[in-house]
Amino acid sequence: MASSSDLPNDALETLRIDGVGFIDLIRDNDPDMPVPTCPGWTLADLAYHQGEVWHFWGRIVASGITERGQLQTIRQITPPDGAFLVDWLATTHNELFSALVDAGTEQEVWTWTGANRDAAWVRRRMVHETAVHRFDATDATGGPYEVPTVVAADGIDEFLMWFLGRERREGEMRVGGTVHLHCTDTSEADTAGGEWFVSSVKEPSATFTREHRKGDAAVRGRAHDLLMWLWRRSDAGVEVIGDEVVARRFRAYTDLD
């Protein structure tokens, strides 16, 4: 994307829908239910994590935090148990949403990327954070959910920009080749073509272009399936063509914990 504010979807509306969907899943299911896509976590653990993320970024935006030292002003919270968990989760979502609406897209904020960004960066990050965790909760509870194609394709782009290679997972080997990612359900008008060529993955970043270009490995699938494959949530619906070792190392390289 040329700019954080130049997104292919209505970020606030997507955040609203997925946030409400996530909260509903937490409200309607056993909090002790395990979450297979997040080993060792229960639904309650997932809810705590999502609420803490919403709270953290909501305070950064609402307080206009632009320096790392100011992060200490964010009040540490202890998520409640039992019936109050859902109310707390809804409050953190509402506070984040309101902060993003009030800030607009151009307000400068601190980020962990090494530079300050605009509030549109936070909108985008929260859209994809929430969508992936709504998938986690839905997968655990057995209901249907897929990230919409345009949102998922933008999520792939965001993953490549800000996560791929940021921190190498302990024990993982270098990728050793190039990778072509190809969404099979996108159009150029929707998502800058839905194709990416990753030429290098080396901590702390990856080098990629948005184009159709042959790689040592090609990974193809619908945008939702590719996004979940990248986040190591699921292998469903994804086809690997070419060097499977390169594809496996590419997927495993980044520490996502």
Image (spheres, rainbow, N blue to C red):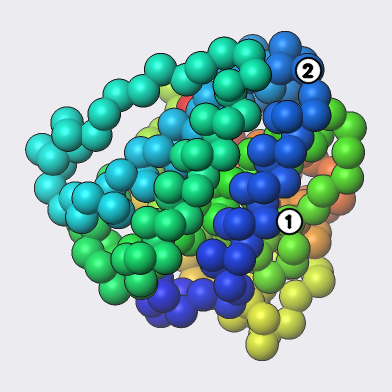
Report the residue marked by disc 1.
147
Say which of 214 and 94 sits in front: 94
Residue 187, horizontal then vertical, whole percent = 73, 82
Location of residue 46 (image quadrant): top right
Tell me what residue is drawn at x 50 percent, y 39 percent: 91
The secondary element bearing badge 2 is classed as loop
Say which of 120 and 182 sits in front: 120
Give the farthest residue toward the bottom. Answer: 189
Location of residue 112 (image quadrant): top left
Marked residue nearer the N-terminal end (2 or 1): 2
Q: Amino acid at mark 2?
A: Asp
80 versus 61 height, above or below: above
Q: Is residue 79 visible?
A: yes
Residue 118, horizontal then vertical, whole percent = 29, 66
The CA span between labels 2 and 1 is: 24 Å
Tell me what residue is drawn at x 51 percent, y 17 percent: 80
Report the residue marked by disc 2.
30
